Amino acid sequence: MTETSSGPAAASEWRRGRRLGVDLGKARIGVAVCDPDGLLATPVATVRRDLKTAGGDIPSDIREIAETAREYDVVEIVVGLPVTLSGEEGPAAAHTRAWVERFADHVSPVPVTLTDERMTTAVATRRLNEGGVRGKRKRSIVDQAAAVEILQQWLDQRRR
């Protein structure tokens, strides 16, 4: 499942350029980027969630990810949408949609696309385990690895 949540309808047509992948978690946000040809996603950063900023102020996590998008001159941002294994949306998906709505306003006119992120954190965790990454180090990069999985799956799906 992929849907465009903001930006021009042309976001569904492939255009060359870097994309940013985002894995929104409760405490941290993983960020990944791909090459301009959309072949390979790589980790960029883990951003601490800002749950304290209220009202009309822009949370620091949104500002930081928007700045990363500008630094990489991205043409699109892909955010993982947490759905259940049966494909239904629950409270986590509603939370993600609310965050994306606020985020999309801040990064406009860059389109923000939601994509099914089922099993990406589990796959990322398994790959880190297979690579011998354990403990605190794994906790600090699992969000980035999940963002890589989200973006890579989206890129692979687009290529098919």
Image (spheres, rainbow, N blue to C red):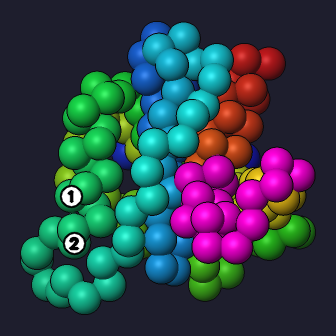
Region of the chain picked out in magenta, as a range: 130-146
Image height check: is 155 above or below 48?
A: above
| Residue 134 falls inside the magenta stretch | yes
Amino acid type assigned to the residue bearing label 2 in the image: Pro
Image height check: is 60 above or below 144?
A: below
User: Residue 101 lies in what quarter of the image?
Assistant: bottom left
Contact (Cβ within 8 Å) of mark 2 with mark 1: yes
User: Residue 135 lies in what quarter of the image?
Assistant: bottom right
Q: Residues within 10 Å of mark 1 (few under 14, many from 20)?
A: some
User: Residue 160 lies in what quarter of the image?
Assistant: top right
**Who's the residue at 21% across and 58% down the image?**
63
**Who's the residue at 89% across and 69% down the image?**
86
**Who's the residue at 28% across and 26% down the image?**
73
Camera sees residue 159: yes
Q: Which residue is mark 2?
A: 59
The percent coordinates of residue 159 (x first, y second) are 72, 17
The label number, if any, that marks residue 63 in the structure image: 1
SS assignment at label 1: helix
As rendered, which of 67 and 136 lies closer to the eye?
Answer: 136
Camera sees residue 8: no
| Residue 108 falls inside the magenta stretch | no
68 horizontally vs 156: left or right = left
The percent coordinates of residue 32 (x first, y second) are 51, 42
29 horizontally vs 51: left or right = right
